[in-house]
């Protein structure tokens, strides 16, 4: 086993997932944009671009990375509550598919820049549907108290200013209510709200040709092997049925459900420390490589690499990282076969929001391209144990 820790990606799983997405969407006017923020590893982006998906980007860097990996500029949606002028210029110059806007001032800035640079960009307005995603509060975005989306006051002001905004083409609407959503009722409610909102919007602003319902489909963290491919069938059925009256193309921005299960984090046990109350397994990966447990209390399945589950020989460990923070823990009382220094652990379901959220805290990564990064990204086609 090479130097640890490293992210391990199983491209077979990724491709099976992508095939499942296309099987469920090919007969409808459905368009899936991969949310690059979930994982921007170049090889992963290239695989996804090859399958013909669009991209959902949230920074100028992500737009350039998407184009570099083979996504067509026309398939790119650019979102984000705080786009800089430089990022807007990148979007304009590459003539990307659509810019999702979240405030009146942002629309005015885009309008002015488009006028000056001679572009006529397509924009969609992000509205807040006030739907409770029933997920972790920190990854819930569709309630009125969240910072996302145009507020009602700003929307009314926009309607009054429409004639001034003549360098942008308002093509439609964007919604996104949160992430790691496993209850399909939440998406049904989103469809109900959209079905109410769209006719009102059309009355005030005019006909639309674009509807984007965001992402958010969750994955099975508890038992990844029972949910390696997320339930795309039920998910897309909800929208097929729930939005049928509108008769519009529907765009999706899926991140976690596409890449979550294809990745894992491999880490080595540095020390096993015993106390009268518990055992700690101190490993060489930390919150710097996988921040989700520290940030959201997220739980990822942990397995001992290369060891089949032996029920007779189970020991409990708090699996902790080397970072100088008490929150640097991957889980308490994790049942594993007995561990010793040098054993390798696999932390599952790390394809999404792991590598892309990694940090340099505690000097964990060398800056620059010619220095070997401490965390290798390995792309072999071997399945985890
Ligand atoms: N569209 C928008 C506007 C978003 O904000 C997001 C995710 C997505 C699409 C993709 O959502 P997905 O299909 O991956 O659920 N770091 C957190 C997740 C943050 C999600 C942010 N927005 C985590 O580790 O759980």
Image (spheres, rainbow, N blue to C red):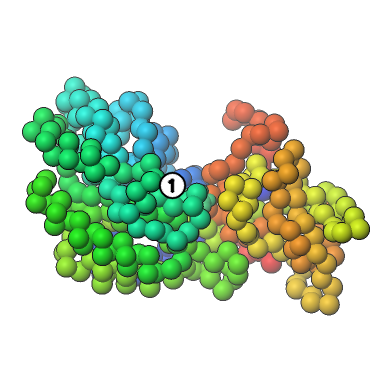
Q: Is residue 62 above or below residue 343?
A: above
Secondary structure beneath dot 1 equals: helix
Q: Is residue 303 left or right of residue 192?
A: right
Can residue 54 be seen here? The reply is no
> Is residue 86 found left or right of 372 in the rendered image?
left
**Quadrant position of residue 47:** bottom left
Query: Position of 222 compared to 207: left or right?
Result: right
Q: Is residue 303 above or below residue 116?
A: below
Choose top left, top right, bottom left or bottom right for residue 239.
Answer: bottom left
Q: Is residue 151 above or below residue 51?
A: above
Q: Residue furthest top?
A: 116
Q: Residue at x 70, y 57 (%)?
A: 331
Image coordinates for residue 327, horizontal then vertical, percent? 69, 46
Q: Name the residue carrying label 1.
A: 36
Residue at the (63%, 59%) spot, across then down = 300
The residue lying at 26 percent from left, 60 percent from top is 193
Residue 296: image x %, image y %?
A: 58, 51
Residue 303 location (% of width, % of height): 71, 64
Q: Is mark 1 within 8 Å of ligand 1?
A: no
Question: Looking at the figure, which quarter contains the C terminus?
Answer: bottom right
């Amino acid at each position: 086993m090479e130097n640890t820790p490293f992210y391990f990606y199983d491209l077979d799983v990724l491709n099976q997932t992508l095939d499942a997405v296309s099987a469920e969407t090919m007969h409808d006017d459905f368009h899936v944009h991969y949310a690059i923020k979930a994982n921007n590893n170049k090889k992963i982006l290239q695989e996804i671009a090859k399958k013909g998906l669009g991209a959902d980007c949230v920074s100028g860097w992500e737009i350039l990375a998407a184009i570099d990996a083979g996504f067509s500029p026309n398939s790119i949606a650019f979102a984000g509550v705080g786009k800089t002028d430089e990022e807007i210029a990148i979007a304009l110059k590459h003539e990307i598919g659509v810019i999702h806007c979240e405030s009146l001032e942002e629309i005015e800035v885009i309008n002015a820049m488009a006028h000056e640079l001679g572009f006529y960009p397509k924009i969609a307005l992000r509205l807040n549907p006030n739907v409770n995603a029933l997920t972790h509060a920190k990854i819930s975005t569709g309630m009125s108290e969240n910072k996302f989306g145009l507020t009602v006051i700003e929307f009314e002001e926009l309607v009054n200013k429409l004639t001034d905004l003549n360098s942008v083409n308002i093509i439609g609407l964007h919604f996104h209510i949160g992430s790691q959503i496993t209850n399909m009722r939440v998406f049904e409610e989103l469809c109900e709200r959209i079905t109410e909102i769209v006719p009102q919007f059309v009355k005030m602003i005019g006909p639309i040709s674009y509807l984007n319902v965001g992402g958010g489909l969750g994955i099975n963290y508890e038992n990844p092997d029972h949910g390696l491919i997320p339930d795309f069938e039920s998910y897309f059925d909800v929208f097929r049925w729930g939005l049928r009256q509108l008769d519009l193309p529907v765009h999706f921005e899926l991140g976690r459900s596409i890449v979550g299960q294809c990745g894992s984090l491999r880490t080595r046990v540095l020390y096993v420390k015993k106390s009268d109350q518990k055992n700690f397994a101190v490993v060489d990966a930390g919150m710097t490589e996988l921040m989700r447990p520290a940030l959201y209390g997220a739980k990822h399945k942990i397995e001992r690499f290369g060891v089949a589950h032996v029920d007779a020989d189970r020991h409990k460990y708090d699996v902790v990282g080397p970072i100088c923070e008490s929150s640097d823990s991957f889980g308490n009382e994790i049942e594993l076969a007995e561990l010793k220094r040098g054993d390798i652990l696999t932390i599952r379901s790390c394809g999404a929001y792991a590598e892309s959220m990694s940090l340099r805290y505690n000097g964990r990564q060398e800056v620059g391209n010619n220095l070997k990064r401490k965390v290798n990204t390995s792309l072999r086609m071997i399945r985890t144990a």
